[in-house]
Structure formats: C-alpha cells, structure tokens
Image: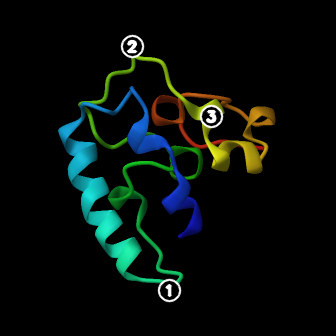
Amino acid sequence: MINIKRCLCPECPVQSESVCVEGKWRIMQEIAWASESGMYFEADRVPGMYCSTGKALCKDINLKKMCICEKCPVWEENNLKNGEPKLYFCQKGESKK
C-alpha cells in the first residue's frame, strides 16, 4: 500500500495521456487513500507498480516517450537498477533480482 502511494508511474510520460491508466488510477487511489489497511490489489487493477506487477494492461500507453523509473523512490529503495529489466517495466515486465 505504501509503495502504491509513492509510485511515480501515473506521472510517467509513457502513460500520462492514457485514458485507461487514468481511470484505473483514480479508482485505485480512492480505495487506497480511504483505507489504511494492508489491502491487496489484483495486478489487473493497478495501473502502475509495473516493477512488481508486470507489463501494462492498458494498450493506449506511449512507449516512444521517456520513462522515469530512475526518479522513482520505489525503484531506488528496492535497488531495481541491479535487476532485469532496469527500466520500462510497463513494456518489459516486472523486475527480477
């Protein structure tokens, strides 16, 4: 839950214009911010956290734009620079360390 609140994926240029991502993120935020519990979200409901959930389900993301994984506190704290893939989790899938 904490990582969802700090995730930068919704601000990423790759998905900033995605209608699919915006809709999923808005619903998830309402649930996450309303609940302080350790609520678990199924991967198909999370429009971000690709480093742990895998490839993007939304097909309207723009993979030609620059990702911002390296600026994300979740990426830094989990040492994802040493995992594979290193960036573009939305396209390449979750990180394997």
Q: Residues within 10 Å of mark 2 (few under 14, many from 20)?
A: few
Which residue is rendered at x = 33% and y = 64% of the image? 28
Which residue is rendered at x = 54% and y = 55% of the image? 6
Q: Residues within 10 Å of mark 3 (few under 14, many from 20)?
A: few
* Mark 3: amino acid: Lys
The disc label shown at residue 71, or none: 3
In this figure, which residue is indicated by the disc labeled 2?
Answer: 64
Rendering quarter of residue 34: bottom left
Residue 15: percent from the left, percent from the top?
Answer: 34, 33
Depth order, front residue of 85/39: 39
Marks 3 and 1 sit apart, C-alpha to C-alpha, by 27 Å
User: Upstream in the sequence, badge 3 or badge 2?
Assistant: 2
The disc label shown at residue 37, or none: 1
* Mark 2: amino acid: Lys
Compared with residue 44, is residue 35 higher up or lower down, i.e. above or below? Answer: below
* Mark 1: amino acid: Ser
Which residue is rendered at x = 35% and y = 57% of the image? 44
User: Upstream in the sequence, badge 3 or badge 1?
Assistant: 1
Quick check: 34 left or right of 2?
left
Secondary element type, mark 2: loop
Secondary element type, mark 1: loop
Question: Quick one: quadrant of the C terminus?
Answer: top right
Compared with residue 45, is residue 73 higher up or lower down, i.e. above or below? Answer: above
Q: Residue furthest top?
A: 64
User: Upstream in the sequence, badge 2 or badge 1?
Assistant: 1
Depth order, front residue of 7/59: 7
Compared with residue 40, is residue 67 higher up or lower down, i.e. above or below? Answer: above
